Image (tube, grey):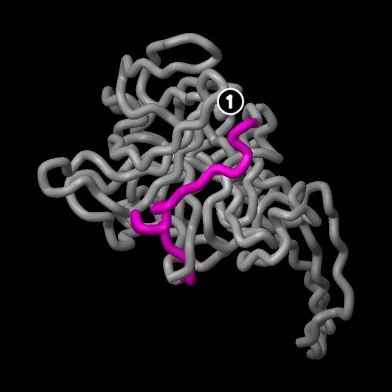
Amino acid sequence: MSIAPYTTLNAPDRTASIEILNLDATNARTTVSIVQEAEQAPVVPLPTSGILAPPGVLGVGETTGQLTLRGSTEYAGTIYAMNSDFGAPANETVYVAFFQYGSLIGTSSSTVNKTFSKNEVVWAPENYDIQALMSRMTTDGTPSWTIIPNGVGGSFPSNNVAAGIGDPCKFADGANGSGPWKTPPGSPWNGVTYTNATLPIVNLTLQGSSIPGRGTTDGKMFLPVTGFRNSSAGERAEFDGQDLPGPYGTIVPGSLTGSYWSTANAGAQYLYYGYILQFENKRNTINLSKNSSGRWYGAAVRCVSI
């Protein structure tokens, strides 16, 4: 038997034909049709808007859906990408992803839909059963935000993909849990300084806070104001000059606040809280604090080397 040295391809319906010649007395020819399965649609939606992620801050690409620390393509050639340890910015727009404390489920930083729904989930590890979680978000009576797995009740969790908990920094750029980055402990946030306190934070892509560390040519990290997702129903969150209540997971825009997780917890007496770096722009003043916040908060993550 031999296979003819050609195939015919019908691209629209993704089929191909291969002609096979039987080398026997009959010299019979057989045509075999091959049908290629269509690519599966992603289980989680790709992000289409949000805070542009600089190098070092976990974000999700709008084209590939990859979790990355390289930063959005818009940062290429800027001071925020120079001398970076995270590689050149990605070849796509990358939006900041929010995580609950010790969670591996990334959610959108977009303010298009301020209230949370399953459509705001933008990333999960490859081997995590995100389909089951998304299904529960439509059938379970529990509010969708509160069934996202996180590290409530103890120390910052080790990676457990099946349970959806661990350190998302270790999954960046295809590392799948073994990468060279981690969520910072509380200590890197010590001695926080703000370098442009006289300027109101209005441009979410080019302004923010700088803290001592690697990331730019002047030896300081760049952290854009990101906003956050609140942690409980009815929590009052001041933004846009108003003090407003919102349901679980409601997003508070970045025009007011930047929030970044650490792995530090608030001690045995406060197992539902973890320490977060938070800086606020209120009444033209900047307030920096290392608050202990509920672990259901959705906040950004600026990774550091292991």
Q: Residue at x 56, y 29 (%)?
A: 254
Viewer-closest of 293 and 21: 293
- Identify the residue shown where x is 63% and y is 46%: 53
Determine whether the residue tagged by mark 1 lies in a helix, strand or loop: loop
Q: In this image, 76 relative to 301: left or right?
A: right
Instruction: Check if residue 181 falls in the magenta segment.
Output: yes
* Residue 132 in sight here: no
Q: Nearer the viewer, residue 236 or 3?
A: 236
Q: Is residue 227 left or right of residue 94?
A: left
* Residue 170, horizontal then vertical, whole percent: 45, 64
Q: Residues within 10 Å of mark 1 (few under 14, many from 20)?
A: some
Please tell me which residue is depicted at 66% across the width and 38% down the height of the picture.
207
Can you say which quadrant of the picture contains the C terminus? bottom left
Reading the image, the residue beneath label 1 is 255
Residue at horizontal 33%, vertical 38%?
291
Residue 211 in sight from this viewpoint: yes
Q: Horizontal and vertical percent for residue 140? A: 29, 27
Image quadrant where one finds the N terminus:
bottom right
Q: Nearer the viewer, residue 106 or 292?
A: 292
User: What is the three-letter code of the residue carrying label 1?
Assistant: Ser
The part of the chain drawn in magenta is 179-198
Residue 89 horizontal/vertical position (percent): 71, 58
Is 136 above or below relative to 24?
Answer: above
Residue 147 appears in which quarter of the rendering? top left
> Where residue 31 appears, x then y in whole percent?
79, 68
The residue lying furthest to the left in this view is 269
Q: Is residue 128 left or right of residue 96?
A: left
